[in-house]
Structures are given as C-alpha cells and as structure tokens.
C-alpha cells in the first residue's frame, strides 16, 4: 500500500533556479485511495504550487471547471455556510463557465450556497452596457445557474464614491469569511485583475487607471475604437487576492506565454503582478500547451510528468446528486 | 425556489424556459420573463432588485413570437362588422375571442363602404380596449371606403361610394361622424381635395392608407407627402404595375418618400389574392414595409357557402371568396397564422421575417411598437408559443394564457 507523502515548501522566491534539483520546489507524492480523502480534508494545511498543463483550451477549461466543481461539493456548502468564489471575466474563462453551467444543468452542481466576488468592473460604463462586467457575468454565467442574486457581488463602477465602494467590497469579503477559491486570469502584461504593472503587491480594492496595453487588448470588445474603451476601473488588489485561501489562475493562448514565463520562472516583481502568487500558500496555474511556449522545456516536462497526480484532483468528478 | 426580494413589485414573476424567442430580428435561445403583464428585463431584476423567478414554465422548445396584429379584418365566424346591427360589440367580441387561436392578439375591425347611417350607428359602439381572456385587443376601426374609386371598387357597393370634393374634411366627418375610435382610413388619393383630407386625418393621428384607386405614382407620392403611410392590399384594387408609370405599387421603391418615413403595404398572403411570384417581387423590393393582413370576411371559420360582406352577398368555396355570381374577389377566409405560413413558404424567407410581417411591421405602421409587436423589455406581454411549422400552440395576452391547443400544456 502506498503512503500519502505531502512535502511542504519553505521560503519564498524562485521556484526553479536554473541549476537546482527538482526537490527545491514543492511536490505531491503518490497518494493512496484512502489517502485521497484525507488529502482533501487536510487541504487547508497543505502548501502547494501546481502548474497544470492540458493539451488545448477546451481541456484546460474543463480541468479548471472540474476542480471548481469538486471544491464546492467537497466543501458541502449549506445554509449559513457558503462557499465563496472569486471570479474573473474576459475570453479565457468562457470555456470554464460553459462547463460549470453544463454541470449545473445536469443537476450535478448547485450554486445555491455559493457566494461570488468578481475581480473588477469598468468605471463610468453603464451597468447595462453590453461590455460591462455585469453584463458579462449575467450573460455568461449568472442567468444560467441558480445563484441567489444577493450572493453575487460585483463592484459598482458608477458608485458616487468609488473608494467607499471599494472599501465596502473589501468589507463584504471579510464578512463572508474570506474567499475560499479565487479564480483569475493573467493579462498579456502579466497583470492580475486590473493590477497593472507597477501596482503595489500589497494593494487592496481600489480605483486604477488602465495601462495602454490593457486598453489595446480591450479595444476588440469596443469595435476596435480606442476612444470607446474605458480608461479606469475598480479592481481587487493583489493583496486582496493573496488573502484568498486558494488561488487558481487560468492562462491559455500563445499571447499569454511571455506573461506566464515572467510570472513563474522569474522573480516576484511588481511589474508582473501575477508573480506575487509565487508567495501564496496554495496556487494552481491551469494552462494549455500554447501558454507554455516561453517556459523552459525542463519546467514543462516536470509538470507534465505530474499530471497523473494533478488529475486525481478532478477524477473522480463529484456530483451533488450523490450527496442526496 | 429562493425567496424573492423584489423592491419594485410583489407581483409574481414568470420565467418561460426551453424556448427560442424572437428578439432583435433573430430567434435567440433565451428565456422570456414576464411580470404584471409586461416583458421583464431579467438582468435588471437580478442586479437592481436581487429578484428571481417565482414560476418557471417549460415551453417544450417552442418558438415565442410577439402576438400577431391584423389591421384589416371585416368579420368572421358569421359576423360581419359592416352590418348595421344594434349590438356591434357582441359580434366584435365573438370574432376577437375566436381569432386568439389564429395567434391574433390585437386587431382593427374593418368596415367596408357603407351608407352614412351605418357608420353613425356602428362607430359609436366600437371601443378601443385591451385584450385578455375575453379576446384579442381592439386597436381601433379601419374604415375602407366610401371615398374610393368607382373603377376599383372591387366588392364595395357602387351606390354608396362617395367623394369629398365639395367640403373636404367636413364631408368625411359628415359621413363617418365619430372618429374617436378610428385608427385607419383607406381612400383613393386621386380624388379631388384628398391632400387636405389626408393632412387632417394624419394630424388627428389617424393612419391614412391608399387603396381601391386608379392613382398614378405621382398622385400616390403626393398623398405620402401629405401623410399617407399605408397601401391597402397591394396589387389588388389598384392599377397594375407599368414600367412607365408604376402607380401605387411604385411607392415600394419611390425615392420621393420623406426622410425617416416608411411606406407600409398590406398583403393578403392566402395564395389566392396574389400570385406567389408577385408576393416575392413586393417582398424583395421593400421587405421592411410588408404587413400581412387577412382581409377576412364573415365566412372565415365557417363552412363554404353564401355569406355577407356589408351590403353584398359573397360565395365561399374553399379559400376562394367571390361576389355571388362573379369572379370578383371579395375579402378572404384565410386565418392570420395560415397567412404567415404561406408567406414563409412562398417567399422562402426566414422564420423571423415571416413573424415580423405579422407583428413588428403592423405595430410600426400604427406607431405602437413601444408597446406591441415585439418582445422588448417593458412591452405588453402579448405573445405566442409556436411549433417549428409556425402553428400556434398557445396565445398569451398581458402575460396570461388566453388560448392553447388541447394537447399542449406547460
């Protein structure tokens, strides 16, 4: 019988110094079936960084959705004990949302006892504008599931006092007991949410002026017209996301490859704010092949070699039907 | 179902699911939300009111379209609106209830050329009213005649034709007397002083339609300049299209239409009144103006045989309706939903186009599209559940089911 072996990394900084042996990082050893249950139950005490690499966008989206699904179900949310989820927008998570909706429509997953906090919202865009993040979340997620509207929190970019709105958002997160799993994406400039290059890694929810890179990247949603793209947004801070108990970053596509390289193979740096998560106790980066194009072959081979371990997190895929 | 926490209203919220709705000119796989007889915006409900549905209804993959609007219907089921009876309202009520099964949720009861005594007696009894379980809503009367051309009278009785050349609008007023509930007037624009009449009717908010006329194109264009916006049953009872003078038909492609105005034209697509090729020519020339009408007569819904149309006797044989003993067409016995299906098949157009010709376009003609004819948020919840062949499964007015097939329940 194999024994569960969970080693714990100590200290911050580089995950992979170019010359260091593999044990300098964190790893999960092989796990027995009975160990799997205890693995989940002592999840909170393990400290891990995982790079999960799938062949393509669809498989990456599906893996991420399965992971979220299992997290929620294993948590056994109920009245008064909600699972809190941080959520992103953009094109990357669309496939993941579609899969989650599918699990819901099949009766396998309910969001009745899930609270959500979105990362950001544009300032000055009417809430019902087709490109607002409220519209995005409604059309791509909320309208297809059974979440209680009182539990779906998105920053209000039209609030009269924007900083007060940000402070209130932080308070709501605190009052809900903190975020269990924060799902995010990465910008081509390595930003998380709208924490543009140069943002403080200790930052909290606040008003940010968008970098030109971000405005250019968003122009495609505004008929390619730069003048129509909002220039300011409210965003959770790097510090806010770091407070979450677990963080999952979705990174797909070749255009994100350089940002991923900067985020995990180089140092923690406020010019590439996603790099801050090297110091988070529980982070998963979920990628497709294309997103790994700028990584070292050694890094990619190492983590691909761990896929049989990573896949145990999503297989078996739990269902709320079994719970009843 | 989670507890509702609606700040705007306590009325129950209905969510129609598993359907395809006609919105923004396309069939979209979306749910239809209804509250207090109006189409509700679910995103606004979610974010502003933190509300959710009270009752979810599975529409079994139906198409949901706005209710049909028939702006030219002379009667049906043995009822003839132009017959001067003491109780016009009960006849209208009977028809309004029966046409629910054809998908019509609003209509304009139409009176053909009649003596002034008929108008004086009948018009005060017609009232504009909302639809409901009792029947389709009444938008107002359509008066077709008596100010029409003798040469193109069709089934209208010649001795009751009239002109307004001496007193213009005053003559019209003397004939009709009560205009409160009048929504559309069909007249022949070549008649002397028609411009003044058209202008005054338009000023009073009454839609002017050109029909039963021998007008040439420039006379028709002048009428449009003065306010006319509709053509009564295109091709029928007017001069045929001629390449050097297209007549009223030429309005479809005229460049003399005032900016921001559109000319609409009624078509009876029952397969009898117009050859499918002619239907296609009109549709292709001016697709956004096409309004499907039934021009149904008392015999609609009844067995073949002899029926009346105002002062005339009509013979019904299958779908053909002629003045008794002649080959002159007079109205139809088509139902609105069969017109929509025939239009779809004859033109090969999209389902969306066929549905809009019977809902959006008549609403635009009457200037009521902010309330009716679409499934836009805050519009009246008058809608239909249809199958893929566009057969009506159920009819709803103000969010309430007012008719459904026996075999269809949701």
Image (spheres, rainbow, N blue to C red):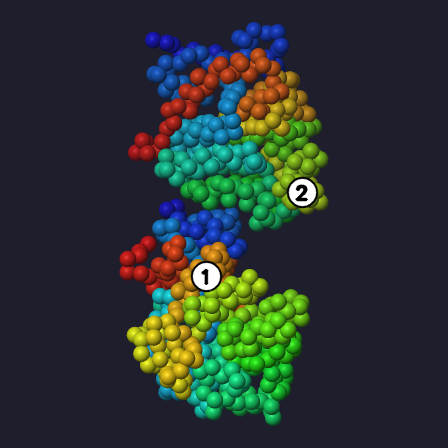
The residue to which callout 2 is attached is: A224
- Mark 1, Cα crowd under 10 Å, few <14 / some 14-19 / many 20+, is some
Disc 2 to disc 1, C-alpha distance = 41 Å
Residue in view at x 49 percent, y 81 percent: B144
> Residue visible at 44% across and 33% down?
A83
Is the residue B173 above or below the residue B220 in the image? Answer: below
Residue furthest left as drawn: B407
Q: Quadrant of the C terminus of chain A?
A: top left
Give above or below for B160 relative to A314: below
Determine contact: label 2, label 1, CB under 8 Å. no
**Residue drawn where x is 55% and y is 81% of the image:** B213
**x and y percent of residue B253 in the render?**
62, 67
Crowding at label 2, few (<14), some or many (≥20) Cα neighbours within 10 Å?
A: few
Could you say where residue B285 lies in the image, as x and y percent from the top left?
A: 58, 63
Q: Quadrant of residue B334?
A: bottom left
Can residue A106 be seen here? The reply is yes
Q: Chain of mark 2?
A: A
**Location of residue A185 by image quarter:** top right
Q: Residue at x 66, y 22 (%)?
A: A269
> Is residue B67 or residue A71 the one in the foreground?
B67
> Are the numbered discs 2 and 1 placed on the same chain, yes or no?
no
* Helix, strand or loop at mark 1: helix
Frontmost residue, A177 versus B268: B268
Which is nearer the eye, A58 or A241?
Answer: A58
Residue A177, image x and y in percent?
48, 32
Residue B346: assigned label: 1
């Amino acid at each position: 019988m194999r024994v569960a072996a969970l080693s714990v990394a100590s200290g911050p900084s580089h995950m992979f110094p170019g010359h260091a042996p593999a044990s300098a990082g964190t790893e999960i050893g092989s796990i027995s079936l009975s160990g799997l249950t205890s693995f989940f139950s002592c999840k909170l005490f393990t400290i891990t960084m995982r790079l999960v690499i799938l062949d393509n966008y669809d498989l990456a989206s599906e893996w991420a959705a399965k992971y979220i699904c299992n997290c929620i179900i294993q948590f056994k949310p109920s009245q008064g004990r909600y699972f809190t989820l941080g959520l992103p927008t953009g094109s990357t998570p669309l496939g993941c949302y579609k899969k989650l909706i599918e699990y819901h429509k099949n009766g396998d997953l309910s969001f009745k006892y899930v609270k959500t906090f979105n990362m950001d919202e544009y300032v000055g865009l009417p809430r019902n504008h087709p490109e607002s993040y409220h519209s995005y979340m409604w059309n791509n997620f909320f309208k297809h599931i059974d979440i209680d509207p009182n539990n779906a929190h998105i920053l209000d970019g039209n609030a009269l006092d924007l900083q007060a709105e940000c402070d209130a958002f932080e308070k709501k997160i605190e009052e809900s007991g903190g975020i269990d799993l924060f799902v995010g994406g990465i910008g081509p400039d390595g930003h998380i949410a709208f924490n543009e290059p140069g943002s403080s890694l200790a930052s909290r929810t606040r008003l940010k002026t968008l970098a030109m890179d971000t405005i250019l990247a968003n122009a495609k949603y505004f008929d390619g017209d730069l003048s129509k793209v909002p220039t300011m947004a409210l965003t959770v801070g790097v510090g806010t996301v770091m407070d979450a108990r677990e963080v999952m970053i979705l990174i797909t596509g070749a255009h994100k490859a350089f940002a991923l390289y900067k985020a995990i193979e180089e140092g923690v740096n406020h010019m590439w704010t996603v790099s801050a998560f090297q110091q988070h106790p529980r982070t998963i980066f979920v990628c497709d092949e294309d997103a790994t194009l700028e990584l070292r072959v050694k890094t990619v081979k190492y983590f691909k070699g761990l896929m049989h371990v990573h896949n145990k997190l999503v297989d078996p895929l739990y269902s709320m039907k079994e719970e009843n | 179902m989670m507890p509702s926490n609606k700040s705007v209203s306590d009325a129950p919220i209905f969510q129609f699911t598993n359907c395809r709705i006609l919105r923004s000119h396309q069939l979209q796989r979306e749910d239809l939300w209804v509250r207090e007889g109006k189409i509700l915006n679910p995103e606004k409900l979610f974010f502003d009111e933190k509300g959710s549905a009270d009752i979810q209804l599975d529409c079994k993959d139906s198409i949901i379209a706005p209710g049909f609007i028939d702006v030219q219907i002379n009667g049906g089921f043995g009822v003839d609106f132009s017959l001067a009876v003491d109780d016009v309202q009960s006849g209208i009520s009977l028809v309004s209830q029966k046409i629910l099964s054809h998908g019509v949720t609003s209509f304009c009861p139409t009176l053909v050329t009649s003596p002034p005594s008929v108008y004086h007696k009948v018009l005060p009894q017609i009232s504009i009213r909302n639809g409901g379980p009792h029947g389709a809503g009444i938008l107002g009367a359509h008066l077709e005649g008596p100010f029409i051309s003798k040469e193109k009278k069709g089934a209208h009785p010649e001795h009751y034709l009239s002109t307004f050349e001496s007193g213009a609008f005053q003559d019209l007023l003397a004939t009709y007397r009560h205009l409160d509930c009048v929504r559309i007037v069909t007249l022949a624009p070549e008649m002397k002083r028609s411009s003044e009449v058209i202008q005054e009717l338009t000023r009073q908010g009454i839609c002017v339609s050109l029909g039963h006329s021998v007008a040439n194109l420039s006379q028709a264009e002048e009428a449009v300049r003065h306010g006319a916006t509709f053509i009564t049953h295109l091709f029928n009872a007017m001069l045929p299209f001629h390449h050097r003078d297209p007549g009223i038909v030429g309005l479809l492609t005229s460049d003399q239409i005032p900016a921001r105005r559109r000319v609409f034209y009624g078509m009876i697509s029952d397969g009898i009144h117009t050859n499918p090729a002619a239907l296609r020519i009109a549709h292709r020339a001016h697709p956004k103006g096409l309004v499907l009408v039934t021009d149904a007569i008392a015999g609609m819904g009844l067995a073949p045989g002899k029926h009346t149309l105002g002062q005339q006797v009509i013979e019904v044989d299958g779908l053909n309706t002629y003045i008794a003993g002649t080959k002159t067409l007079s109205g139809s016995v088509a139902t609105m939903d069969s017109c929509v299906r025939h239009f779809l098949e004859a033109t090969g157009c999209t389902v969306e186009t066929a549905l809009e010709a019977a809902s959006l376009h008549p609403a635009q003609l009457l200037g009521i599209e902010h309330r009716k004819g679409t499934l836009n948020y805050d519009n009246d919840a008058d809608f239909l559940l249809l199958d893929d062949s566009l057969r009506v499964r159920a009819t709803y007015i103000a969010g309430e089911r007012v008719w459904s097939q026996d075999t269809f329940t949701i």
